[in-house]
Image (cartoon, helix red, strand yellow):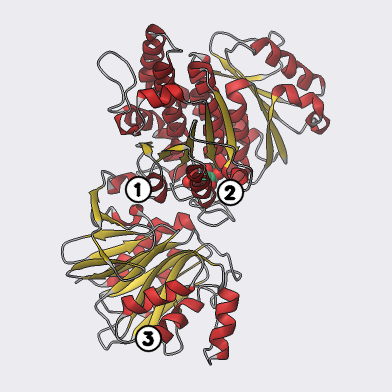
Amino acid sequence: MCGIIGYTGPRPAAPILLDSLRRLEYRGYDSAGIAIIDADGDVATVKNTNKVVDLARQVEAEGTPSGTVGIGHTRWATHGRPSLENAHPHQDCTGRIHVIHNGIVENYRELRAELISRGHEFLSETDTEVVPHLIEDAYRGDLAAAVRSALNRMQGACALVVISADQPDRVVGARMNAPLVVGLGRGEVFVSSDITALIPYTKRIALLGEGEIVTATPDGITVQQLDGTAVEARVVMVDWEAEQAQKNGYPHFLLKEIHEQPDAVRNALRGRIDDLGMVVLPELGVSSERLAEVHEVVLVACGSAWYAAMVAGYAIEHLAKVRCKVEAASEFRYGEALVDEHSLVIAVSQSGETADTLAAVRQAHQAGAQVIAITNVVGSALPLEADGALYMQAGPEISVAGTKTFMTQMVCGLLLALRLGDARGTLDVSEHQRLVAELQGLPDLLSKTLELEPMLVELGQRFAHTHSALYIGRGINFPIAMEGALKLKEISYVHAEGYAAGELKHGPIALLQPDVPVIAIATRSATLPKMVSNVQEVHSRDAPVIALITEGEDPFDAGFATTIPVPGCSEVLSPLINVIPLQLFAYHVAVQRGCDVDQPRNLAKSVTVE
Ligand code: AGP
């Protein structure tokens, strides 16, 4: 979950490391630190227990370390509370080897005890600190070899970047079950947990495989496997623009990303619809014959991606008439995983690095299932492990809470549902083409929906002090109720739950009181009359109702609900429109409450630990 960056080249390292850490901060913000090898061959370290902006101020106040080789880290605490001692980089006993790490060294207790018994001194409570000491023990004049030797002793997940005063021209990086990419510039190399940090500097990215170690000097890179075998790195060009990772006048990345959704949908559709108006997904890597034979589809994902997967599951059952199971990846991986060669497993993950989702994919593969990844990040682990990948093409998402990536996960799910319906002959061509045309028109409807924002600002003010909220939806909009509730929890710290509306009377209705708003998704659908009855039940318990309705089709004649009229569309596409007012509501409640919208407490964007 932590953000890591290493640099070697001709330029002063400190400004590059600090700038990159600002871009990586969404991965964790419990502390930040840098280490730089100076002209005398000493390593200067600066750490701060606050955010990167505070680290930058400290660096300025204390004097920027000179030197053109260095590493930087922004932490999401796992082992050891957020403190100066536990902030990275960590060093060996000699102070010559410095390490930053993302992941968990699962056998750190045994390693630490062993190292202490051999006289090593530890300064922190972290699992990471065993790494520089292991490298110190193994160092015989070749840093990469010492890193390999250390990795061979470690279990768990780890991406590392290491510098040593004894080989001051280089950074050594290692990838083992945690993300690490290499940016290739002109006479300079960057090693980072995330492409987002690199896009202002280079778009040439070398992808590392699992268990690979990169040695970077200003002259270039060499890559080895754990046993020392040399390998060729796969180099790709990324099409993300540095500008996409700026706020561009918006007060928060979250609001910018909410407003980027029409364009994100346009991009997600790019290259995927042929001249006849049919969905084509050549990158899928699964033939039509195979899609036609699939007995069941299992979708695995976490958090918002799980809810997007549920929307996809509804669409697949509806359009492709194949049984779908949607499971939280964290449950699937420890369950019976009853999939086989007749199953199609779809793993959904924005980052492509979520540990539970990756573990679920490995389990599905072992059982013989074919796996398709839906992800946003080129070079992440998920598409490397899957049989085929569908990229969300949403561009970089900086805010920790997902919005435009949730939207594009749903778009990819719908494209897959249409493709499956076509391959299985369950969807006639004219209906397929009609839905595709509607999808193509969706960005305009999303823009129209975004125009509702003044209404959501007002509702945000009205409900800023609520302590609890319930969201209800039915069918394909049930996951949207859960996503609306998750957004409110994540960014405004208001307790909220999403329920299938028919379930309300089986328990949650006991929570209703005049200060508990109920947000009901009551747009056009086959079950709208049922939803109207559910809302009536809520109103009878004096809870305030906010209802999303289809414009021009107000189903509530009593006028008791605050209604938000959204553009009409087919029910199967309605989640894409309905989520927007819920995102805006969560955002404006959070702003009213003075919350740190882009970096909510305790969260990190990529959850690379269990
Ligand atoms: C979204 O707002 C969340 N922060 C979170 O639930 C997220 O969707 C989840 O951690 C999964 O991430 P992924 O899509 O990168 O796998």
- The answer to whether residue 162 is above or below residue 197 is below
Q: Quadrant of residue 12?
A: bottom left
Residue 150 is situated, as x and y percent measured from the top left of the image, at 43, 76
Q: For the residues carrying marks 3 and 2, which lies nearer the camera in this image?
A: 3
Query: What residue type is disc 1 on?
Result: Ala
Residue under label 1, please give it. Answer: 245
The quarter of the picture where the C terminus appears is bottom right
Q: For the residues carrying marks 2 and 1, which lies nearer the camera in this image?
A: 1
In primary-sequence order, the first of circles 3 and 1 is 3
Residue 347 is situated, as x and y percent measured from the top left of the image, at 48, 39
Query: What residue type is disc 3 on?
Result: Arg
**Disc 2 Cβ-to-ligand 1 distance below 8 Å:** no
Relative to 512, 65 lies left or right: left
Q: Which of 59 and 178 is in front in this view?
A: 178
- The answer to whether residue 2 is above or below residue 150 is above
Label 3 and label 2: CA atoms lie apart by 43 Å
Residue 338 is situated, as x and y percent measured from the top left of the image, at 59, 37
